Image: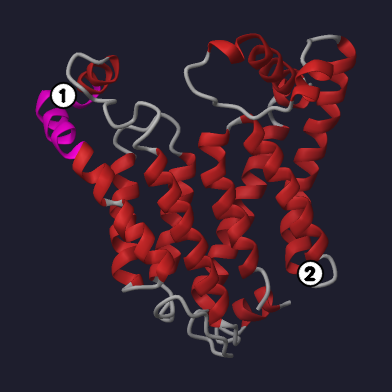
């Protein structure tokens, strides 16, 4: 297994730099999507004077820092789309990655749930450590240890994300019981027509058949919760092993598709980066 060989050899095991280049492309597209949708759904005017978001953030940051942030907010919101796109396109990739890193860090000032941003910060930082990010839209194959450290590090981060997520879910009695997922679907079925934006993509058949809090439905969601925990534990090893890798990729994509139905605006970005990292699990 190249992952262990690379560690033993001091990261001199040859890998294909095309894998990091594909990940650079996927990360750039994911960040372009994230930065573009941040301008919609009320995001462009989120910190307009007298808005609730402004009042809450002003109280947290103080008057001076909030004023600086509010003035920079819209220009940064628009400007950071450009380096995200050039990162995907492979133009000045290291400089583009550095600017994308700054754009992601800017979002941490005000975001309520920063886990996906933290994961993106780690992913882009891994790209910055790779000497060969390619140039332009062409993906070039070779056998070299130039990107071995960056590829190994990103795989380690993805493994930690999965195992850390499984640990937290396994230690949550509410999630293990199935009630968390059952309540999520039930509440959405009740309020979906009152939401200003479409925040969930839960299929009608799921809302109809599993959208109540009956004991039977909770038992179904309990089985789903246990399956998710088991998959998050098993996926990294299955992705690293060549015989099981194709099946692990298919299962991982299906699992993340289910996650995205619950929170598309938050999880499409995170899931794109996570699934994109699958290209790095092979040498």
Q: Is residue 132 above or below residue 65?
A: below
Query: Please, what is the dominant secondary structure of the magenta stretch?
Result: helix
Q: Secondary structure at mark 1?
A: loop
| Start-end of magenta stretch | 60-73
Q: Secondary structure at mark 2?
A: loop
Find residue 243 and name its label.
Answer: none
**What residue is drawn where x is 59% and y is 61%?**
277
**What residue is drawn where x is 90% and y is 15%?**
216
> Earlier along the polypeptide chain: callout 1 or callout 2?
1
- Say few, some or many: other residues with alpha carbon within 10 Å of mark 2 (under 14 / 14 to 19 / 20 or more): some
Look at mark 1 in the image and give the residue it sits on.
62
- Would residue 64 be counted in the magenta stretch? yes
**What residue is drawn where x is 54% and y is 25%?**
198
Q: Is residue 10 above or below residue 61?
A: below
Q: Give the residue at the far right of this rendering.
A: 216
Percent across and percent down for residue 251 are 78, 51
- Would residue 232 be counted in the magenta stretch? no
Percent across and percent down for residue 96 are 31, 65
Percent across and percent down for residue 95 are 28, 69
- The N terminus sits in image quarter: bottom right
- Say few, some or many: other residues with alpha carbon within 10 Å of mark 1 (under 14 / 14 to 19 / 20 or more): few
């Amino acid at each position: 297994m190249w992952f262990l060989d690379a560690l033993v050899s001091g990261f001199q095991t040859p890998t294909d730099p095309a894998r990091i280049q594909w990940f650079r492309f996927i990360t750039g597209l994911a960040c372009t999507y994230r930065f573009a949708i941040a301008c919609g759904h009320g995001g462009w005017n989120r910190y307009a004077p007298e808005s609730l978001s402004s009042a809450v953030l002003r109280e947290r940051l103080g008057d001076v820092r909030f004023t600086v942030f509010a003035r920079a907010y819209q220009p940064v919101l628009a400007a950071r789309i450009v380096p995200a796109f050039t990162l995907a396109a492979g133009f000045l990739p290291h400089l583009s990655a550095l600017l994308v890193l700054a754009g992601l860090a800017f979002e941490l000032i005000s975001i309520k749930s920063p886990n996906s941003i933290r994961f993106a910060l780690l992913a882009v930082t891994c790209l910055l450590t790779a000497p060969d990010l390619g140039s332009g839209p062409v993906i070039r194959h070779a056998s070299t240890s130039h990107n071995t450290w960056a590829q190994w590090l990103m795989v380690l981060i993805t493994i930690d994300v999965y195992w850390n997520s499984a640990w937290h879910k396994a230690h949550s009695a509410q999630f293990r019981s199935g009630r968390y997922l059952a309540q999520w679907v039930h509440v959405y079925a009740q309020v979906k027509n009152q939401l200003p934006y479409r925040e969930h993509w839960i299929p009608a058949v799921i809302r109809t058949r599993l959208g109540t809090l009956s004991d039977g439905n909770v038992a179904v969601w309990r089985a789903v919760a246990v399956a998710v925990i088991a998959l998050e534990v098993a996926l990294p090893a299955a992705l690293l092993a060549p015989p099981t890798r194709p099946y692990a990729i298919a299962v991982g994509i299906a699992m993340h598709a289910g996650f995205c139905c619950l929170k598309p605006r938050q999880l499409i970005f995170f899931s794109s980066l996570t699934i994109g990292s699958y290209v790095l699990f092979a040498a």
